Image (cartoon, helix red, strand yellow):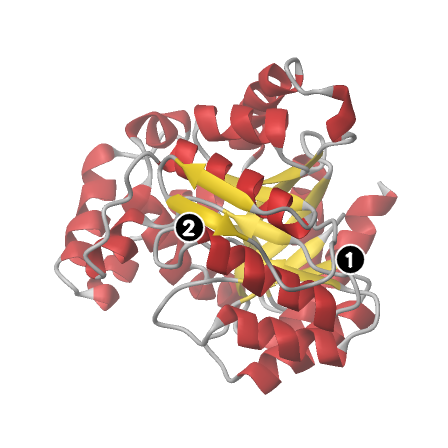
Amino acid sequence: MNGIELTPEHPPDRIADLAALAEREGFDAAFTSSHYFNRDPFITLSRMAERTDDLLVGPAAVNPYDSHPVTLASRMATVDEVSDGRAVFGVGAGDRSTLANLGIDRDRPLRRVLETFKVAEDLWAGGTVTHEGTFTAKDASLNVEPAEIPVYVGAQGPQMLRMSAKHADGTLINACHPKDLEWSAGQIAQGLKERPDERGEFDALAFASVSVAEDEASAREAARPPVAFIVGGAAPPVLERHGIDREAAESVSEALEGGDLNEAFDHVTEGMIDAFCIAGTTGTVAERFSAALEHVDGIVVGSPLGPDLETAVELAGEALGRASEN
């Protein structure tokens, strides 16, 4: 499966238009990101479902902290209903700093994510659930028809990757560089050794930051904001894997923490862009997609997409088509 991430920083109708365009360009799925400062992802997903026919739709990735997991299960069941069975549940631990803005402590993230989708699966099957763990549910059930909704776990660290391979239908690997994807594939392979046969096939997707344009320089410039945030949250081993200077990364982090976004973006180096984003023209991006597909089953083309969203959707679709032919 190949997909695209559509960030609801624009009104739902525009995101729905982009989803319809993505479907015409051959994408299999469209995900919408979930952050409190953007439009509501589930309202946006409903609009996306209305405007498309076969496209899978879902959040990527919603977190089970700022909404109760049973409420998330209900919202996903609603998206599945209005899309005639095309929902995909993308769930992850969420961004620690964003949740901190809301006074939320991201406690026991691995356990919370696992319990969230296990409870959701029971609810979607029509069950009544009582659960005591990282959250509480007592005699909870959903007033909807039973459904099977695939679960994709947003993952980056070793434990979350292994857990997703053992228990979920797929994973959304928060990486785009072959070095990171090769390492992630190794973690997933360990989890698959313990995967029950009844879980069926597993789908590993690179959830990749992508910036594509007809002009290389414009594409790379548009990549600076997301790369800054990726660098700001990158673990030291990841920085070392790509030979990124620790002091340079700290300059980005300090500017972000100080609220000076423009300074943070200015501190992003060419090496950081190469490590954490697939940026360039269609040809360049197609080559990077081909390299990524050596380690994963598919790609989700993620933010920023490019300096012009409509053009970027078309060019990214073309690049994926080229890469798939190789």
Position in image of residue 8 (x %, y %): 50, 73
Position in image of residue 52 (x %, y %): 78, 75
Residue 131 picture quarter: top left
Q: Which quadrant of the rendered structure holds the C terminus?
A: top right
Q: Residues within 10 Å of mark 2 (few under 14, many from 20)?
A: many
Work out whether mark 1 precedes mark 2 in sequence or the reverse, and give the earlier one.
1
Nearer the observer, 128 or 214:
128
Residue 142 visible in the current orientation: yes
Q: Which circle marks residue 64 in the picture? A: 2
Q: Is residue 98 left or right of residue 155?
A: left
- Tag 1 residue: 28
Q: Residues within 10 Å of mark 1 (few under 14, many from 20)?
A: some
Instruction: Look at label 1 and name its amino acid.
Output: Asp
Instruction: Look at label 2 and name its amino acid.
Output: Pro
Residue 23 picture quarter: bottom right
Total numbered circles? 2
Q: Tag 2's secondary structure?
A: loop
The answer to the question of whether label 1 and label 2 lie on touching residues, with beta carbons closer than 8 A, is no
Q: Is residue 107 left or right of residue 217?
A: left
Q: Is residue 262 above or below residue 1?
A: below
Position in image of residue 225 (x %, y %): 37, 61
